[in-house]
Amino acid sequence: MIKIAPSILSADFGNMARDIEMLNRAGVDYIHCDVMDGMFVPNMTFGFQMISAVKKVAEAPLDVHLMIQQPERYVERFAEAGSDIISVHAEATNHLQRVLKQISGCGVKAAAVLNPATPLDMLNYVMDDVDLILLMSVNPGYGGQSFIPAVLGKIAELRKMIDATGKEIELEVDGGVTVGNCKTIIDAGANVLVAGSAVFNADDPAGAVKLLRG
């Protein structure tokens, strides 16, 4: 089953509750929350308070993507705020396996994230520690960027790695996902699609969610 995880980075921050209610009606699978610190990426978004506020309204699990340096400093606080999945970048910590265990220890699903130019071998020794792997298909920091075509081969290679483990690890793709390219991304092996403007800017968001499922 293909899952859709709209990113609230594209929502109207002044009407967040309204936009989350729209996602509830659209039947989304996850709500993707991009947390940026202005250091790991050149942008800042929101923190624990926003996660707590979204959790009160959201019907779907919160997929919290930490684009922050040394995420281990804040794992427990984001778990307490209501995260159902916490994703950390391999590039942002010196001890990826330790942080993934830290996340799992909070009773939250653990996910590793790789930027477009980061090789998949960063994952070789953490496949037993992840519930989900997120591949960035844009360089993180801003919404509305175009999908990097070279990532398609990376998705296909990661799908083979996951299948070889025999584990039910989800493969998520984030960045430039549209109704026009979603089938290609799914065919490459992704089963969770993060979409921001493709949902929030659509005339019919619920219809866009159905189209994104491929």
Image (spheres, helix red, strand yellow):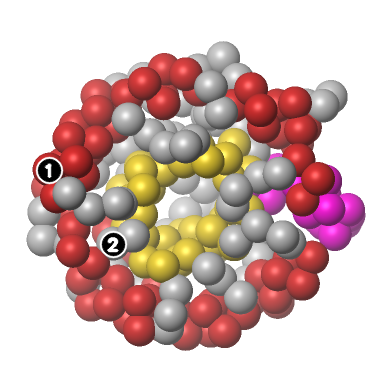
Residue 32 vertical position relative to residue 194 in the rendered view, above or below: below
Marks 2 and 1 sit apart, C-alpha to C-alpha, by 14 Å
Query: Residue 162 appears at what percent x and percent y?
Result: 21, 44
Q: Is residue 176 left or right of residue 103?
A: right
Query: Residue 22 appears at what percent x and percent y?
Result: 82, 46
**What residue occupies the far top of the structure in this picture?**
180
Please tell me how many numbered marks the rendered image carries.
2
Quarter of the image for residue 102 reads bottom left
> Residue at (30%, 51%) from the top-left corner?
169
> Residue at (51%, 52%) from the top-left corner?
42
Circles 2 and 1: CB distance less than 8 Å?
no
In the rendered image, is residue 188 in sight?
A: yes
> Residue at (75%, 26%) from the top-left corner?
207
In the rendered image, is residue 11 in sight?
A: no
Q: Is residue 171 left or right of residue 156?
A: right
Q: Which residue is mark 1?
A: 164
Query: Residue 194 appears at what percent x and percent y?
Result: 54, 40
Magenta stretch secondary structure, dominant: helix
Q: Amino acid at mark 1?
A: Ala
> Residue at (83%, 53%) from the top-left corner?
21
In this orientation, which residue lies closer to the viewer: 71 or 178?
A: 178
**SS of the residue at dot 1?**
helix
Residue 102 vertical position relative to residue 119 in the rendered view, above or below: below
**SS of the residue at dot 2?**
loop
Q: Which residue is mark 2?
A: 130
Query: Residue 33 appears at what percent x and percent y?
Result: 60, 57
In this orientation, which residue lies closer to the viewer: 187 or 141?
A: 187
Residue 17 falls within the magenta-colored stretch: yes
Residue 151 falls within the magenta-colored stretch: no
